[in-house]
Structure formats: C-alpha cells, structure tokens
Image (cartoon, rainbow, N blue to C red):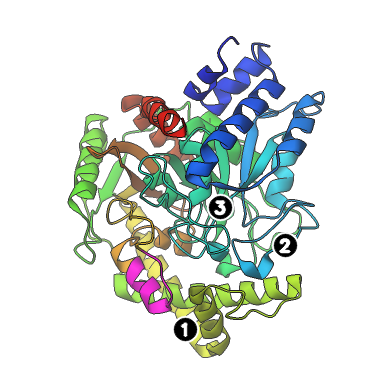
C-alpha cells in the first residue's frame, strides 16, 4: 500500500481485508497507529500506558491465529487488567500496581489475535460521565479540545475518533460506552446482560464491549467476546449466529416508540432536540412506524434507587481493590467523590440496599412492559451537547445525582434492565460537535439493533466526518 494514511479512511474490517490480500502487512499497520498515537496523544491524553514494544514484537511474528480480526491493533480501557502491565482504574489507590493475569475479555481478544497498543484513560473506577482523573489528567475531545470526550470510556472514544486505533475496548455501567460514543461521534453498543461473561460487581449492571467507527466493526468485536464461561451463575445466549451476519440483514418495518425527555420528566437542549428530530424523520423515511410514547417509569424513583445500588456496589469494589493492592482506601489515595461513595456504601444498611434493589427491579419491569407494544425505543443519549472540561468535576453523591438528572438521564436504565442499547452518530452541530441518539431493544434483541444501525449507517453515512476531523488534528499536531 503506497500511502498508509489511506488506512484511516477505512474501518477495521476493510483494513483486515488489505492485510489478507497482502497489500499491507500487520507490522506496517501496527507502526502506522503507533506513530499516530505518538503524534496525537500529547493533544488528547487518551492513552495512559503505551505497550508499543510488545505490539511491535507481536506484529513481527508470524500470525498464529486464523481469525477475522487477527493482527489488528486494539486499545484496552484501564478498568481491565492485562497480565504484567500497569492496572490503575484511574486511581492513586492502584498507582504502580501491575496485574498478574488477563481478565476474560482481554484473554478473548488475545486469543483472537488482536494486538494491544496500550491502555486508555478513564475516570477513577469509571464512576463519571467525564474522563478527568487526578492520577492521569483529563482526556480531551478531538472534535473540540475544550470539551470532554465523555466517560467513563472517554480515552477509548477519543482515541478511536482521532484515528489512533480503528477500534477500542470499553465498558458500560451506566452509559459509559454510549455516552463517549455520542460525544465523540462514534458507534457505541451495550450488549444485553447474558451475551457476554457477567461480572460479580455493580449488581450485574456493568458490561464490556467497545467503541467503533463502523457498525460492522462493533458486531465483529462483539463476536469475539460473546458467550459465557464455564462458571457463569446466569444463563447466556446461543452464540452460533454471529452479530456480524446481522449487520448484513435488512430489518423489518419496526414500530419505534420515541421520547425526547422521559415524558417531560427531564429537559434537553436545543441542539439535542434538533438531533432527535432529525433521527425521527430518518426513521420515518426508512419505512418505520414512529410514535411518541408515555414511558412507564418514575424517573425520580429510578434515579434514587439506581444511585444507591451503584454506590453500595462501588464501595465494595473499592474495598476489594484496596485489599488487592495492600492499601487502605483513604482521602489520601482516593478522589473526593470516590471517598464519599466508599464511606456511603460502608454505612449503608442491608435493608436500604435491598429495598433499593427491589424497587429498581420493579421499575425495570415496568419499563420493559413497553416492549409488548414496540420493537425499539428512541431517546437522546445525553441531555445536552458535550460539557466543557472541568464543568462536571464532582465531589459528592448529591452532585452525582444532579448530574444524572441534568446531563445523562437516558442511559442508566438499560443497565438496570439488562437491555441492549446503542448510540448511533449522525448529527453534528454547526461547530462540528457530535450528538448521538440512543436506541434500546428488549433483552436479547441485540441482533435487531445491529440490523437497524447498519440500515441507518447506509442511509446517513458518517465516516466522511472522520476524514475532515483528521485534517484538523494534523494541522494542530504540526
């Protein structure tokens, strides 16, 4: 391939096709992205731990794995351990800690032959919808360097949007895949509970997957990690059909319920409303039946109980991580918000936690009743355009709750219900700030979301936006 810069105009699967045809080598692809990280990371602070020597060494070896993604580069979010590499969770509590083994997702990526270029920036323990940890410093949004790339997978999203890798690992405990996908103009997919191995932490609301530029790249990556382990406590789904196949299937005419504001229970800004209206028109043009709905959910009750569950489980995670590193969690090694969460969780009674869990499940069941009438639900991802860096720095649970009400009202419910949900790009403001729209399907209907996302991608392509972004980033880098 005469001009490696042409790689950045292709999605990951198209790059793999070039490798398969012998037009570019794995080593050339690896070195290309390493150089882009070196050039752009000082501007974006997306990668907090490079793994370049290991990546180059792996790329020079003969490919040992015959897999549709083998040889492609990937970044791993620093909430997941890679054997013999730093593992910080964005926290001083784990500063200097080195992981002893891969977690199950890293292991599956490794078995598929993916090549790790490093680990990405995350807020401390992934607690926030921004990425500004005290340990590593703030990540910046490549579309507007004064804005946050979102969180908690903000480093991963900034890196993919900027073309530092074709795709990156992410995870989602309240919207942490979908929110940064929205703010960085990417496709972000949260799989159903049970599609992948389930963590014992965060009351099973957190899932792993990725942020990508194309829909089919997301499907192909999900095929890598899908399916439970031999030690799952819950049933998992049939893995024989691939998610990638579903992106090649036309969806039926869908009945899609829409709500821009949880029926007046929250507010959105003017730009988000424009993005929402544009998506509604596109869905109608594609032949889908679109109808504004009354969502069977008390937003205030759901928010209160979600925060209680989240804080209680978060405190347990902090306590266990402290024991893993041999450090006692304290104000000296935790950020103010994390320390408040840790204290609140340890002081929470069993009654308070169990009541919140029961009430959240009841709200979740009410919400899921909507899918007796509709195939999908459309909402915004966020209530407003991406915030400026430093604007949402929080030090209390009360501030966190206000943030959920005023900035990220729409994403956490899918974590409580276990539904699949996705952020689909397609709208940019006049200032080139992206705003994504969110679709939710019934539990287990992940294939339906991929079908619709692929249809939207073909009807309203967004890939050309990355080429224009790349031109601006290259100018800034010089």
Depth check: give the residue in front, 36 or 304: 36
Give the alpha-carbon distance from disc 3 to disc 1, as whole Å.
Answer: 35 Å
Mark 2 or mark 1: whose residue is earlier in sequence? 2
317 vs 289: above or below? below
Depth check: give the residue in front, 280 or 338: 338
Left or right: where does residue 378 sit relative to residue 133? left
- Residue 396: in magenta span: yes
Mark 2 or mark 3: whose residue is earlier in sequence? 2
Q: Do we see residue 157 in this rendering?
A: no
Q: In which quarter of the image is residue 350?
A: bottom right
Disc 1 target residue? 355
Disc 3 target residue? 121
272 vs 37: above or below? below
Identity of the residue drawn at 63% across and 38% down: 74
- Residue 397: in magenta span: yes
Which span is picked out in magenta? 392-403
Q: Residue 24 carries which label?
A: none
Query: Do labels 3 and 1 touch, CB within 8 Å?
Result: no
Q: Which mark is residue 96?
A: 2
Query: Do labels 2 and 1 touch, CB within 8 Å?
Result: no
Identity of the residue drawn at 24% across and 40% down: 429
Neighbour tally class for label 2: few under 14, some 14-19, many 20 plus, Cα within 10 Å: few
Neighbour tally class for label 1: few under 14, some 14-19, many 20 plus, Cα within 10 Å: some
Q: What element carries label 2?
A: loop
Q: Do we see residue 256 in this rendering?
A: yes
Mark nearer the viewer, 3 or 1 = 3
Give the alpha-carbon distance from disc 2 to disc 1, as whole Å.
Answer: 38 Å
């Amino acid at each position: 391939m005469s001009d490696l810069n042409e790689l950045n105009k292709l999605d990951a699967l198209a790059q793999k096709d070039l490798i398969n045809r012998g037009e570019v080598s794995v080593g050339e692809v690896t070195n290309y992205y390493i150089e882009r990280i070196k050039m752009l990371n000082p501007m974006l602070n997306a990668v907090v731990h490079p793994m370049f020597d290991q990546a180059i060494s792996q790329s020079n070896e003969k490919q040992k794995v015959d897999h549709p993604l083998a040889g492609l580069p990937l970044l791993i979010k620093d909430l997941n351990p890679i054997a013999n590499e730093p593992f910080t969770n964005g926290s001083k509590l784990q500063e200097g800690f080195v992981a002893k083994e891969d977690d199950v997702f890293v292991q599956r990526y490794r078995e598929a032959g993916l090549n790790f270029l490093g680990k990405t920036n995350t807020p401390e323990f992934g607690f926030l919808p921004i990425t500004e940890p005290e340990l590593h410093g703030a990540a910046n949004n490549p579309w507007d360097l004064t804005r946050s790339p979102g969180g908690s997978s903000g480093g991963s999203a900034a890196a993919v949007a900027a073309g530092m890798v074709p795709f990156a690992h992410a995870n989602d405990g309240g919207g942490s895949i979908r929110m940064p996908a929205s703010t960085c103009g990417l496709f972000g997919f949260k799989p159903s509970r049970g599609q992948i191995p389930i963590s014992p932490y965060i009351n099973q609301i957190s899932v792993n997957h990725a942020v990508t530029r194309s829909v089919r790249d997301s499907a192909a990556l999900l095929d890598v990690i899908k399916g439970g382990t031999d030690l799952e406590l819950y049933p998992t789904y049939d893995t024989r059909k691939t998610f990638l196949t579903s992106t090649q299937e036309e969806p039926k005419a869908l009945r899609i319920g829409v709500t821009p504001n949880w029926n007046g229970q929250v507010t959105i800004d003017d730009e988000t409303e424009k993005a929402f209206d544009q998506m509604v028109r596109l869905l109608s043009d594609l032949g889908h039946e679109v109808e504004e709905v009354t969502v069977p959910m008390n937003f205030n009750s759901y928010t209160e109980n979600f925060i209680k569950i989240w804080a209680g489980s978060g405190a347990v995670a902090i306590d266990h991580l402290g024991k893993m590193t041999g450090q006692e969690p304290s104000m000296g090694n935790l950020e103010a918000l994390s320390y408040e969460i840790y204290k609140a969780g340890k002081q929470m009674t069993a009654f308070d936690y169990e009541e919140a869990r029961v009430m959240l499940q009841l709200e979740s069941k009410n919400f899921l009743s909507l899918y007796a009438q509709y195939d999908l639900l459309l909402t915004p991802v966020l209530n407003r355009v991406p915030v400026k860096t430093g604007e949402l720095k929080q030090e209390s649970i009360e501030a966190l709750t206000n943030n959920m009400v005023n900035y990220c009202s729409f994403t956490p419910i899918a974590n409580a219900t276990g539904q699949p949900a996705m952020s689909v790009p397609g709208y940019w403001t006049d200032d080139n700030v992206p705003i994504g729209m969110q679709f939710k399907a019934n539990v287990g209907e992940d294939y339906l979301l991929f079908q619709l996302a692929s249809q939207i991608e073909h009807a309203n392509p967004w890939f050309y936006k990355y080429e224009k972004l790349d031109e601006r980033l290259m100018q800034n880098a010089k």
